[in-house]
Image (spheres, grey):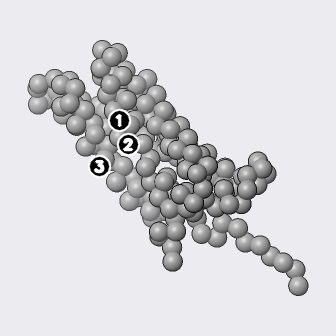
Amino acid sequence: MKDIKIYNVIFPIWFLLFFPPVIFVTLIGNFIIDSIVVIACFYMFKLTKSEHKRKEFYKKSIVKVWLFGFLADILGAALLFITGMFGSELGLSNELITGINYDPFSQPLAVFIIIVAMLVSSVLIFYFNYRFTFQSIIENKRLRLKVALTIAIVTIPWTFLLPTKWFYL
């Protein structure tokens, strides 16, 4: 009888965030979190005292913050996906690949690789927001830097660190 090996039958939890119907929950959750962070930044950095300006700021920025954040999360997840799919071709051990996909805390290097993917997402979130979302809304470069940096730090994709083994029995 021919030996058949089946790899990656159970998807990592971060991978499932991008598939229907879970993607709708992810999109709604990201929108709510991004909304809270954008509004908090408005008050924290005292962008203006006018209620009208707050609504205008929110309306001009939230969709871009949300979509760019999701794009950045997808790109970070793509790094993890490529590492998981082609890790053996890259010379990574099965234990490390399993750590990346299912239990990051079983391998210190898996945690490191996941944190790198999270940082890539965070840097992209910062860049997109600084360069595109807030460029015409916040003229002061230092203030724009603070707002974009705050959003990048708070909305980093922390779910990448969740062990998939917690969700599968």
| CA distance for labels 2 and 3 | 11 Å
Crowd rating for badge 2 (residues with CA inside 10 Å; few <14, some 14–19, many 20+): many
36 or 120, nearer to the observer: 120
- Residue type, label 3: Ile
Identify the residue at image location x=29%, y=49%.
32
Task: Answer above or below: position of 70 versus 130.
Answer: below
- Residue type, label 1: Ile
Q: Which residue is mark 2?
A: 155
Secondary element type, mark 1: helix
Q: Which residue is mark 1?
A: 151
Quarter assignment of residue 132? top left
Identify the residue at image location x=18%, y=31%.
43
103 or 147, nearer to the observer: 103
Q: Earlier in the sequence, mark 2 or mark 3?
A: 3
Task: Answer above or below: position of 161 versus 139.
Answer: below
Q: Residue furthest left?
A: 50
Q: Which residue is mark 3?
A: 32
Q: Residue furthest right?
A: 1
78 or 168, nearer to the observer: 168
Q: Earlier in the sequence, mark 1 or mark 3?
A: 3
| CA distance for labels 2 and 1 | 6 Å
Identify the residue at image location x=50%, y=62%.
163
Quarter assignment of residue 35? top left
* Residue 63, position as x, y percentages in the image: 35, 39
Check the picture and name the quadrant holding the N terminus.
bottom right
Secondary element type, mark 3: helix
Residue mark closest to the camera, 1 vs 3: 1
